[in-house]
Image (tube, rainbow, N blue to C red):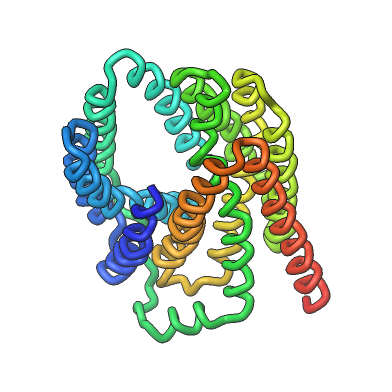
Amino acid sequence: MGTGGFITIIAQPLWGMISDRTRTIRKVLLLLLLCSAVTGYFLYTSGSYILLVLFAMLLYFFLMPIDPLTESLNFRIAEANGISYGSIRTYGALGYGVMALLTGYVLNSFGAHGLGLLFAGSCIAGFVISWRMPDAPVSGKPVTLGSLKLFLKNRETLLFLLLIFICSVPARMNDTFLGVHILALGGSSALVGQSFFLAAISEIVVFALSFRWLRQGKELIIITFAGFFYFVRFFLSAWISDPHLLAYLQVLQVLTFPVFYSAAIQYLYSIVPEEWRATGQTVLALLFFGVSGILASYAGGALYGTFGGKVFFLSVSAMSLIGTLFGFVLYYKNVRTS
């Protein structure tokens, strides 16, 4: 899983730049969905470790860029039609929740081969829907590398991306090892699926009502707020020994990921050049799911394997507290300079 993060570092910005250069998101998504369906199916049906690694790396290359491109599509369509981004993103949370629940039961009943069919089927469904869907509105400004360089060199941008990275590492550690810890506490694969289902379903209300609580100019303090509740969630996880109680605790997702990610996207789109939005979105996803995923997988695996779940979650909560404090500092500096 950690090695796949290195593939993500290359794949996400590459496909984001292809999308911006070709001025289309839909056509790039169609290609990625089709390739993901094929590689994902063979991943879950492969019978040797070498083939498993090969198809996993290919899947990371085609699958991981889909998320940031879809988010860019969501934001552009919402902006063009005068509706909230969260009202569209709500259905992403619903889809994730349903599939998380279904995956646990399919794995228990049919094994990995059943997951291959489920994965390929969901990709093909996405492909068919995307085929009939209109493309996102494109910027009238020409795509230039100069504007991208100015954006990436901006001090405000770099501090924001650093904040995202600090907060995303503990979040990704939890996402990667929560299932492992539930199983270690005596829970089942179905319970793992249920825990991710509870987390995803709790996001729906937050995304749906984002037009009420997400205010322009308040993004940094909102991200900091989410970082604090990440700290609370992980700190409580360290002391729980009942796998069912740990699964129920995932409802605290309502105050963490949807709040954090919605505010981060809105802030990003306020500072990134309009013509480089898909690329900017992939940079955000690269930090949240790519670079942080590498550190979360390797360091988190070593931490969990050496010291166990309690020390693991206490360490993760400490990282979230550091991110919260850094967010307060950035917000305070912005208030003083504005």
Position of 305 compared to 331: left or right? left
Give the residue drawn at x 44%, y 22%: 101
Q: Does any portion of residue 302 appear in the rendered image?
A: yes
Q: Position of residue 184 (x, y in %)?
A: 53, 26
Camera-nearest residue between 11 and 31: 11
Camera-nearest residue between 193 and 135: 193
From this view, report whether residue 199 is shown above or below residue 228. above
Give the residue drawn at x 60%, y 21%: 243
Please identify the quarter of the rendering in which residue 195 is found.
top right
Camera-nearest residue between 176 and 201: 176
Please identify the quarter of the rendering in which residue 65 is found.
bottom left
From this view, report whether residue 219 is shown above or below residue 315. below
Camera-nearest residue between 4 and 335: 4
From this view, report whether residue 233 is shown above or below residue 66. above
Q: Does any portion of residue 76 appear in the rendered image?
A: no
Q: Position of residue 218 (x, y in %)?
A: 72, 59
